[in-house]
Image (cartoon, rainbow, N blue to C red):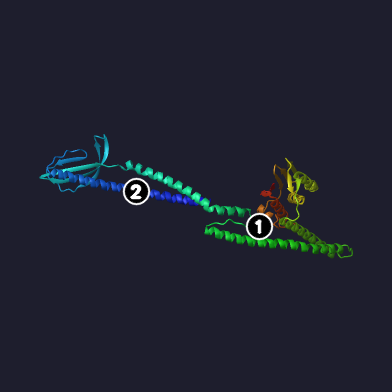
Amino acid sequence: MRLLQITTRYYLAFSALLLSLAAVSIFLIFTSVMREETEEKLWLALERAVHTLEAGNPIIQQPPILEIEVLDTLPAVEPVYRDAFIHDPFEGDQELFKELVAVRMVGELPMRITVRQVILEPHDYLGTIGLPLAVVLILLLAGIVFINRQISRMLWKPFNENLARLKSFSLAEDHPLDLQSSPITEFGELNGVLVRMSERIRKDYRILKEFTGIAAHEIQNPIAVIRANLDEAQQYPELPEPVMRSLSQAGSATSRLTRLNRMLLFLTRIENQQGFNPESLSLRTHLEQILDELADRITEKAMILTVDLETDLVLDVNPELLDSTLRNLLDNAVKHSSPGSRLEIRMKVRTLTIGNTAPPLEKPPEDLFNRFVKADPASQSLGLGLAIVRAICDRNGWSINYSAVDTWHQLTIGF
């Protein structure tokens, strides 16, 4: 969930709670004020009625608003406020009244005087108060969402722009990380940390590439000398069997070292973009050529080969890079497949998929694109084939995906 959504939810929840409490408080305060005001008016009406009677002026009773009853005796009772539902002949309905009943001596006559006033029931003014508050609540919440989105979009724009630049940042391009400045202090500090970190990483990466290239070049000549001396030593037939065995093992190790050195040099050239001029090449032609070269191995393992080339694709790529990509993928598929297993090669509009049956992986497929990572640690593979394929794909802007479900392995290149 995005940060904006989380903060907006908290703002909405807090605002809704606050406005709900405000609505309840207004309702209670309004009810209390109305009650006090009504009681005050009833008391004034009672005093006016008593004053009029004491002055000897007649009062016309107005039930249920004003009722006067002459008593025989004067009971000792206090004035009483109470609510009463009374039938109003003019309204023709039961109405809620607030009434004040008091017993007073008017001249020499004890009288019970009752004054009443219609009061609003809670449901009568609840809509009057609730509707405006509901409208205000909706407008406020909508305004919070809108303003929060607009402000966040403005404030987070540099961050989102820098995030996009970080996603596209590549050490292979050898360009410094350029981040958009931000007026927000925290974002500015983050940009500074990221730029310094990227510079340290670029420096380490350059040193590593230079070391790999120089080491591979410097190792090349001593390896050639060792191989020549081993070949020459093996020409002497009178050497004892243990010595010949040792020379053979040394020759195998030297061949492996030669292959490792050659692949590291090739990988360094790819990453440094050295000497790979592109040409317009047919993907189908190269694919069929490599399949012809692997036909004997496929037949020897009795593999079930399925080739579905719906279309051809002309690529603007260096022949050596395309050949290395296809050869590595197909060679791995044949080498790691079990005898009698399936090998499927399918080419769609802009994708090439190579699938084969092999033992399940013990590590995530994505890890096999790293250098010196092998599916089977005990194999004689150098663990550089898929690293070279990934480097070639990155160089040419291709995507590559490796998926493995049980024993079915599938590599897909998107051109």
x, y percentage for residue 359? Answer: 70, 51
Q: Is residue 111 left or right of residue 305?
A: left
Q: Which residue is mark 1?
A: 175
Q: How many marks?
A: 2
Q: Is residue 407 left or right of residue 288?
A: left
Q: Residue at x 73, y 58 (%)?
A: 268
Q: Residues within 10 Å of mark 1 (few under 14, many from 20)?
A: few
Q: Foreground: 45 or 155?
A: 155
Q: Residue at x 72, y 62 (%)?
A: 210
Cβ atoms under marks 2 and 1 closer than 8 Å: no
Q: Which residue is mark 2?
A: 26
x, y percentage for residue 392? Answer: 71, 52
Identify whether 80 is placed above or below 383.
above
Residue pushed farthest left? 108
At mark 1, the secondary structure is loop
At mark 2, the secondary structure is helix
x, y percentage for residue 46? Answer: 19, 45
Q: Quadrant of residue 249?
A: bottom right
